Image: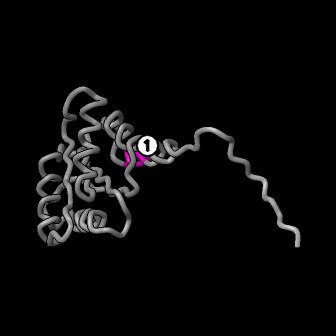
Amino acid sequence: MAGIIIVAHTPVASAMYGFAEHIFGKSPDRVRAIDIPPHEDTKTSFERVLQAANEVDGGNGVLVLTDVMGATPANVATKLEMSGAVSGLHPRVIVLTGLNLPMLMRCISHREDDLETLALKALQGGQNGILRLGNKVTTEKTQEQT
């Protein structure tokens, strides 16, 4: 079973974890949430994410879900991915950004899959979970007449 870490701006990670507890009726095994508060030193953030990775490490890899590309949570997670061998983290680490609730549900539901397959299913779940409700979206272009 792959480990899952949610790394996001405070309080997004904890809120996502709370959502998972609500949907699945319990705290999911090998899942941790790390909220990154404003102005926290990135070294401290990295150490907290590394500790969480070691806690969820079951030998099958760790999937890290972050909220916004280019922000501190994603940067810290990417550092974890790049320094896996140096930090003593044995499994592979994959980082995905753009976290949403369908992505998280998919991750928790399919954790028995290998890490690459899990990452792909997470991406698909996240993308497929974004829909417009109501009026149908058309692809026809309207041209302005001058």
Q: Which residues are magenta?
A: 116-122
Whether 21 is drawn above or below 8: the answer is: above
Question: Residue pushed farthest right?
Answer: 146
Q: Is residue 42 magenta?
A: no
Q: Which residue is mark 1?
A: 121
Q: Secondary structure at mark 1?
A: helix
Q: Residue at x 68, y 46 (%)?
A: 137
Whether 22 is drawn above or below 139: the answer is: above
Q: Is residue 14 rendered to the left or right of residue 95?
A: left
Q: Residue at x 31, y 64 (%)?
A: 74
Count the marks: 1
Whether 20 is drawn above or below 54: the answer is: above
Chief SS of the magenta region: helix
Which quadrant is the C terminus positioned in? bottom right
Q: Residues within 10 Å of mark 1 (few under 14, many from 20)?
A: some
Q: Is residue 41 rendered to the left or right of residue 95?
A: left
Question: Residue pushed farthest front?
Answer: 146
Looking at the rendered structure, the kind of residue marked 1 is Lys
Task: Tell me where residue 49 appears, x and y as whole percent.
Answer: 17, 58
Task: Tell me where residue 115 appears, x and y as whole percent.
Answer: 33, 47
Which quadrant is the N terminus positioned in? top left
Q: Residue at x 73, y 48 (%)?
A: 138
Whether 28 is drawn above or below 120: the answer is: above
Task: Tell me where residue 82 appears, x and y as whole percent.
Answer: 26, 67
Quarter where residue 87 is shown: bottom left
Colouring mode (rainbow / by chain / secondary structure / one colour): one colour
Q: Is residue 28 rendered to the left or right of residue 88?
A: right
In terms of depth relative to the viewer, which is nearer, 125 or 111?
125
Quarter where residue 133 is shown: top right
Q: Residue at x 16, y 65 (%)?
A: 45
Task: Tell me where residue 53 appears, x and y as whole percent.
Answer: 17, 53
